[in-house]
Amino acid sequence: MTNRLLITGASGFVGRAVTSGLMKSRPKLRLVSRIGSQFPDEVLEAVDRVIETPDIFQEDADWWASACEGIETVIHL
């Protein structure tokens, strides 16, 4: 089974480095980032999806349940 990862803060300094490193091992990645964040095309082509939010700390349980559907590991950055 392939580990499915959700990465919060994916557009930040540390998040970009972690995402880049994880892409090399080819797990299924789902990224959470601020609205309007931009990613290189190679990242967008490699990830399951990018979920945008103005503030992850204001999202409710239903939002997180949807974001984490099928996810096995969350990396909060």
Image (cartoon, grey):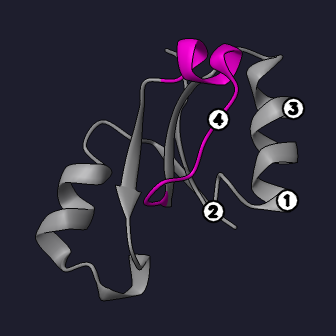
Judged from the image, the secondary structure of the residue bearing numbered disc 4 is: loop
Q: In this view, does 54 lie to the left or right of 73?
A: left
C-alpha span from label 3 to label 4: 15 Å
Q: Which amino acid does label 2 sit on?
A: Gly
C-alpha span from label 2 to label 1: 8 Å
Q: Dot 2, crowdedness within 10 Å: few (<14), some or many (≥20)?
A: many
Dot label at residue 14: 1
Marks 1 and 4, the one that precedes in the sequence = 1
C-alpha span from label 3 to label 1: 11 Å
Q: What residue type is labelled 4?
A: Phe
Marks 3 and 1, the one that precedes in the sequence = 1
Q: Which amino acid does label 3 sit on?
A: Gly
Q: Dot 4, crowdedness within 10 Å: few (<14), some or many (≥20)?
A: some
Above or below, 23 against 50 in this view is above
Q: Which amino acid does label 1 sit on?
A: Val
What is the x, y in percent for residue 4?
49, 31
C-alpha span from label 2 to label 3: 15 Å
* Disc 4 target residue: 39
Q: Residue at position x 20%, y 59% from top?
A: 65
Above or below, 55 against 67 in this view is below
* Disc 2 target residue: 9
